[in-house]
Amino acid sequence: MISRRKFLAATSLTGASIVTGNKSFSNFVEQSTILNSPIVISTWNFGIAANAAAWEILKNKGRALDAVEKGVHVPEADPTNSSVGYGGLPDRDGRVTLDACIMDDLGNCGSVAALEHIIHPISVARLVMEKTPHVMLVGSGALQFALEQGFKKENLLTPSSEKAWKQWLKNAKYQPEINVENRLFSPTKLPGNQYNHDTIGMLAMDAAGNLSGACTTSGMAYKMHGRVGDSPIIGAGLYVENEVGGATSTGVGEEVIRNVGSFLVVELMRQGYPPEEACKEAVMRIIRKKPNTAKEIQVGFLALNKKGQYGAYAIQRGFSYAVCDGNNQKLMVKAKSYS
Ligand code: ASP
């Protein structure tokens, strides 16, 4: 049942006409949680289990930064998840290379890209943030740092991901291929309709009202060796501005990088756009610049603002996200989309 405070938060936005710059949001109904209470949201259905781990920290008044790190550990360690961490699909040379970044309420951030052999790239990204003067480490340098910090070197290529890659090699002509979750086709169609991409992007607000975010992925399956997507790029795959809100993305990273997508969503929220409208405008920038490309790809944005209101928008149907707060632990929401 909707609480009175939640109802008031929603209706106050519905009734009002929010005018910002040249845009007015007169008919806008925002998804909203109880103001100033903890909340965690994350991309795709694997976000449910990740949110549950994050909630353990948030419900005990822990820090949002710790919550997002622990939350995304769940899909990172899950061998059945073929697009994040251990069990992620490899690049076209059969190597599992991981991208991740994390950002806190103070504007600190850390990132690793094309990192091999480490199950929890998000924790390496956090240590880049906390223990180095840098923001981003890549490839062998990121691995060297991880090993120095005590992380264990592991084989991340599971038998099922190896089998899928070998199957792909038979027909794919060594060409990386982009697909969309509602239009899977050969040769990237995987057993059980697994996707050949998807990222966990997670945003949380803690009991103190502070925001943090994390984003981690094995990236686009069968990509060129060395390819880095949007997920570890601060401002593309993730951005958090504690006074305003946070945003994260999933889908074809190249288009998100070209439009600095998550930074754009946060800046639009700063101008007064509600989260869903901000995500929609970021999607529309991609579509307007490259209408033909946009027909063939998926990009989705997810956003949380300082009031605990959230929203998402995608190019294609099929993007969903998980929400966990004091009212509801396992809410799945279908994002609106352009097509
Ligand atoms: N954004 C990821 C990448 O481009 C993939 C995804 O989320 O679908 O690597």
Image: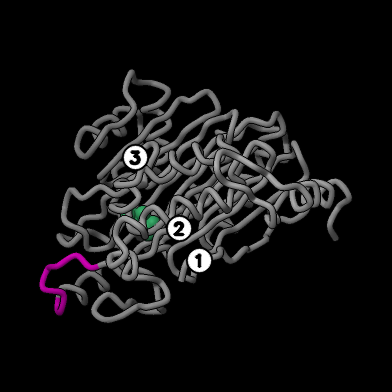
Residue 26 is situated, as x and y percent measured from the top left of the image, at 69, 53
- Which residue position holds label 2? 300
Marks 3 and 2, the one that precedes in the sequence: 3
In whole angstroms, how far apart are the C-alphas of marks 1 and 3?
A: 24 Å
Residue, far left: 173
23 relative position to 297: left or right: right
Residue, far top: 133
Please provide the residue range marked out in magenta.
170-177
- Which residue position holds label 1? 337
Q: Quadrant of the N terminus?
A: bottom right
The residue drawn where x is 67% and y is 60% is: 330
Q: Secondary structure at mark 3?
A: loop
Circles 2 and 1: CB distance less than 8 Å?
Answer: yes
- Which residue position holds label 3? 233
In front here: 166 or 138? 138
In front here: 133 or 56? 133
Question: Can residue 86 be seen by looking at this rendering?
Answer: no
Residue 85 is situated, as x and y percent measured from the top left of the image, at 38, 52
The quadrant where residue 135 appears: top left
Name the amino acid, label 3. Ile
